[in-house]
Image (spheres, helix red, strand yellow):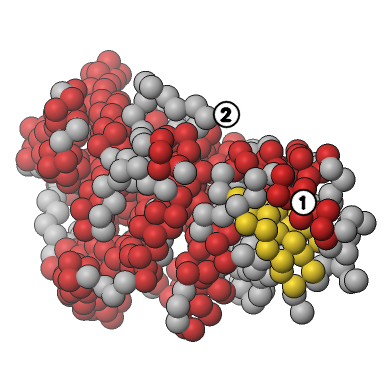
Amino acid sequence: MELNKNFILGVYSDPDQVVKAARHLLKSGVKIHEVYSPFPVHGIDDILGYTRSRLPVVAFLFGAAGTILALLMQFWMMGIDWPMIIGGKNFASLPPFIPVTFEFTVLLSALGMVGTFMIISDLKPYKKPRIFDIRITDDKHVIAIDLAANRLELKKIRSVLADTDAEEINEKNFE
Amino acid sequence: MEVISSVRPPLVTGGKTIADVSEDICKQVEAKPSKSWMMGMAISLTALAVGLYATIMLLWEGIGVWGLNKTVGWAWDITNFVWWVGIGHAGTLISAILLLFRQKWRMSINRAAEAMTIFAVICAAMFPGFHMGRLWLGFYWALPLPNTFGSLWVNFNSPLLWDVFAISTYFTVSLVFWYIGLIPDFATIRDRAKNKISKIIYGALSFGWDGAARTWQRYESVALILAGLATPLVLSVHTIVSFDFATSVIPGWHTTIFPPYFVAGAIFSGFAMVMTLMLVARHVMGLKDYITVYHIEMMNTIILVTGSIVGIAYLTEYFIAWYSGVPAEQYAFYNRATGPYWWAYWTMMTCNVVSPQLFWFKKIRTSIIASFILSIVVNIGMWFERFVIIVTSLHRDYLPSSWAMFYPTFYDVGEFLFSLGFFFTSFLLFAKFFPVVNIAEVKSILKSTVSDKKSLK
C-alpha cells in the first residue's frame, strides 16, 4: 500500500475527547497521520509530538534585518550620499532615525514571519486542500490514520478507535 | 475538564452550539442582501458619488479650491486625516492588546473592528495624498526611491516622512493580521458553499486551509507574535502623527504631552466608531447572542477610561501653558476657549469630556440607545478636537496683520463626504461578503463560556 492514500478517520465533537482519543491511540501503538479541527485544540500538539514552532525566531531574524537595513539606508542617504544642512543640525544622527527604523523593523518582521508561515504550511490561493471530512471546518474534529504507515491491521485500528468513543469511524481514500 | 465561571457573564448567549456559530455567521454571507443592507449601500454610494465629484474637481483644479489661505495652511484635510487615523486605532488595539491581555470578550468584535481599521486607514491616507496637490506623484516623492534629482533623498529628519512609514507599516501589518484571521473562516464558507462561483472564490481566499493540528499550532504562534508586534505599532502610529504637530514651533502644537494624549484620543474615537458600527450590525444581522450587553459594557468602560485621559490631557495643556510663562503659548490656549472658534472648542469639551462621564452610570453603560448616541457624540467631539488643535493654533499667526479665519468650501466638505462614503461602502461590502465575527475563535471559547451547558452535547 502506498503512503498518504488510504485513511481511517475517527470523528469527534468534543475537543477534550480528541485529546483523550489521540493519547489512547498512540498508547495502543497506532500512528496518527494528523488531527484536523475547526479551531485550535490546546494540548494536541504535545501529544502528537510537535515541537514548539520556531516562527518567533524567524520573526526576530527578519526584524533584526529590518533594523539594520533601515539604519544603513538612513545613515548612507543622509550622511554619505547627499548630506544636507537641515536646521543647522548634524547630517546624520541617530534620534530622528528611530521612528523609521522602528516601523521598518516591525514591517519586515511581520511580513517575513507571515511569509514563512505561508510557505512552510503550504498555504496558497491555488492550493486544493485534501478534505478528509467536510465538517472539519464546521464542528467536527477528525483524527486521520494513514493505513500504509501503520503495521497494525485495519480491524485492530478500528477496534482501538471504537474504544475512544469516536462518534463515527470512516474510511477515506484519495486518488 | 470543564470550567464555567460563575463570576463572569457568558460571552456567547442563547445556548449556541458550535454548528450554530458557523450557521449564524455564514448565513449572512450566503443569503441575498437584505433590504436594510441595500438602503445602507444606496446612502453610502450617494455620499461616495457626491464626494467623487468634489475629488475629481479637486484633482483637476488643485487644492486652491479649498478654503485654505496663507495663514491657515492646514485645516479640514489634515483634521480628517488625523480623525480617520484615530478611528483606525481600535481594530488592531482590540485584536492585539486585548489578545496579549487574554481578554476573551474581544473575540466577537475583533473581526469587524479590524476591517474598520483597514478602511479607516485607507481613508486617512487619502488626505495627505490630496494635500500634496499631485496625488499621482505623491507615492514617488514620499518614498526613498532613486530619482533624477541627483538622487536627492527624502528627509529622514521630518516627522511627515515618519508618518509615511508609520501609516504604511500600520496598514500592511493590520491587513496581514486581519487576513490571517480570516483564512480559517473562509475555509468554513468554502466547505459550506453550494454554488460553483463561491466555491472557487472562497477556495482561493482560504488558501487551501485544512485545519491540521500542525498548522493551527503555527497559526497561533503567528497570531501571538503579530499581536506582540502590532501592540507597539499601534502606539507608535498615533505618536508619530502627533509628532507632525509636536515637533513644530507653533504655540498650541509644541507640547510634549501630544503623543500619549493623541494615542488616548485615538483609542477613544476608535472604540466609539466600533460601537456605532457594531450596534448597527448587531441589530441588522441578528448578532445579539454574540455581541452581548456585556461586550457593550466593556467597550463603554474603555471609552470612559480613555475619555477621562483625554479630559485630563486638555486640562494639563492649560496648566502647562500657564506654568510655562510663555505669553504666545498662553494666548494660544486663551484664544482656543474664548476666540472666534470658541464654539468648536466648547463642542469638543462637551462631547469628549462631559458626555463620556455619563458612562459612570451602569444604566447608561448597558443601554443600547444611549451607547449608540454617545458613540456618535464622541466621534463628533474627536473631529472637533483635531479641528481645534489645527485651525485655532494656526489662525492667529505671529503677526497680527496676517491673522485670518478659515471657512470651509464645498470641496472641503466634499472630500470628507468622499471618505465617509468610501468607508461605509467598504464596510457594507465587508459585512455582506466576509464573516463579520471570527468564527474559529468564537468556537474555541464556546465550551468555557456558553450559558447553557446542555447545548454542548
Which chain hosts label 1? Answer: A
- The kind of residue on which mark 2 rests is Met
Q: Distance between the residues labelled 1 and 2?
A: 26 Å
- Left or right for B344, reference A33: left
- Disc 2, SS: loop
- The residue nearer to you, when weighing B362 against A131, is A131
Q: Position of residue B186 (x, y in %)?
A: 50, 65
- Residues at marks 1 and 2 touching, judged by CB atoms closer than 8 Å: no
Against B330, residue B19 (above or below) is below
Asked where in the image residue B284 lies, by quadrant, the reply is bottom left
- The kind of residue on which mark 1 rests is Ser
Instruction: Please tell me how crowded label 2 is: few (under 14), some (14-19), or many (20+) other residues with Cα within 10 Å.
Output: few
Asked where in the image residue A53 lies, by quadrant, the reply is top right
Mark whose residue sits in front, 1 or 2: 1
Q: Position of residue B61 (x, y in %)?
A: 25, 78
Tell me if I can see residue B75 in this picture: no
Query: Which residue is painted at 26% across and 25% down in the image?
Result: B308
Instruction: Please tell me how crowded label 1 is: few (under 14), some (14-19), or many (20+) other residues with Cα within 10 Å.
Output: few
Query: Which residue is painted at 40% across and 43% down in the image?
Result: B455
Q: Where is residue B447 in the image (x, y as percent from the top left)?
A: 48, 38
Query: Which residue is painted at 67% across and 74% down in the image?
Result: A127
Which chain hosts label 2? Answer: B
Q: Position of residue A86 (x, y in %)?
A: 53, 47
Find disc 2 in the rendering and name its residue: B1
- Disc 1, SS: helix
Tell me if I can see residue A166 in this picture: yes
- Find residue B385 and name its label: none
Find disc 1 in the rendering and name its residue: A159
Q: Where the N terminus of chain B falls, by quadrant?
A: top right
Against B72, residue B94 (above or below) is above
